[in-house]
Amino acid sequence: MLDYDSFKKIVEESIMDYIPDRDNYQVNIHPVMKSNGKIYDGMCLIPNNPEASILPTVYLNTMYDTYQATERLDDIIKNTASILMDSKQKLLDSGVETLECNPLDLICGENVKSKVIFSLVNTDANSEMLSDMPSREFQDLSVIYKLYLSDLSNGGYATININNKIADIMGVSEMELHDLAMINTRNILPTKVIPMIDIIKNYVPEFMAASLEQMPPDEQMYIITNDKASLGAVNILYKDSLDKIADITGTDLYLIPSSTQEMIAVSTNLGTPDKVADMVYEVNQDAVREEERLSNQVYKYDAKTKEISIASDASIHRDIKDAPENTNNVEYDQQPRRVCETFSVNS
């Protein structure tokens, strides 16, 4: 098996073999700061002339994860090239023409405000990133804003972060971005609430599945995400979804930050928040990528007051980046959207 540096070199040398208009581009590999200060090797294809269209940034680190799991190097390179070309066509079909590697011209489009969505990140772990973008604090988290560019053929989608420079060009304040995102996010990425037993019963014998269906509602877990299961934790900002779960359980809720992709809601009858927070910390250590960690805290939703607050204090001094990188061979989700998720925009 290739080590990462060898893999990176082969991808850089081979990717152009699968790009039809290869003469129009050159490979550029550059560091990209992801959530929680994680630095990835981003690879984009820079146009050699103004007539060529920008292709999205893909992340060699995530491609290497897939390679380690499958050892199918050629297929990974071919599939990545296919994603790049499909993304290019979708952007062209949506009216995006020639762009530089940092596609600021995109935001001048007529309908750009209808593309503003939001997501959640950990405030302390993202202080550097947050210093250059509109945001608002939400407990120990921060709401940030993105532009939704297009769907991808692999089930994911392409976005760019809205930094201060982009917000200035758009001529919008943080408050305006929040109001836009509150409407747009659920229109573009509809909220999805999934009882955990609906997932588990697909992997257990029939007699166990039948037993699970008899579990009382206040003993169950409920996944809160969106229809693409990506950056879906932000859906806890929509109180009507929380109210529906609270009505089912008949109690207030603990909200568990499983990752940036989803929250898990459980009844407050299921234990103390500090014990749940200890579980969250262990899961972050063992099974969640550093850039997908959201918090070690547990939140409480008060069904009467409609307020969310931090319920735990056992992990309040634990930085989410304290958890070491996974060394337990946990099998991560290897969907292509992890490889080609977003455009990189730097001021």
Image (cartoon, rainbow, N blue to C red):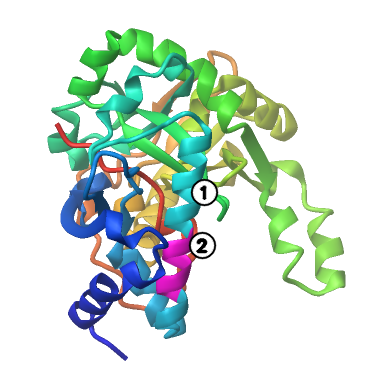
List x then y, in percent, for residue 303. 59, 21
**Dividing the picture into quarters, in which one does residue 66 lie?**
bottom left
Determine whether 53 is above or below 321 in the image.
above
- Residue at 26% x, 17% y: name it: 167
Determine whether 78 is above or below 19 in the image.
below
In the picture, the disc for residue 181 is none
Q: Tell whether position 81 is magenta.
A: yes
Would you name the residue on which mark 1 appears? 156
The stretch of residues the image draws in magenta is: 76-82
Q: Tell whether position 77 is magenta.
A: yes
> Number of marks in the image?
2
Element at badge 2?
loop
Q: Main secondary structure of the magenta part?
A: helix
List x then y, in percent, for residue 317. 20, 44
Q: Inspect this view and state whether residue 334 appears.
A: yes
Would you name the residue on which mark 2 appears? 335
- Residue at 33% x, 35% y: name it: 98
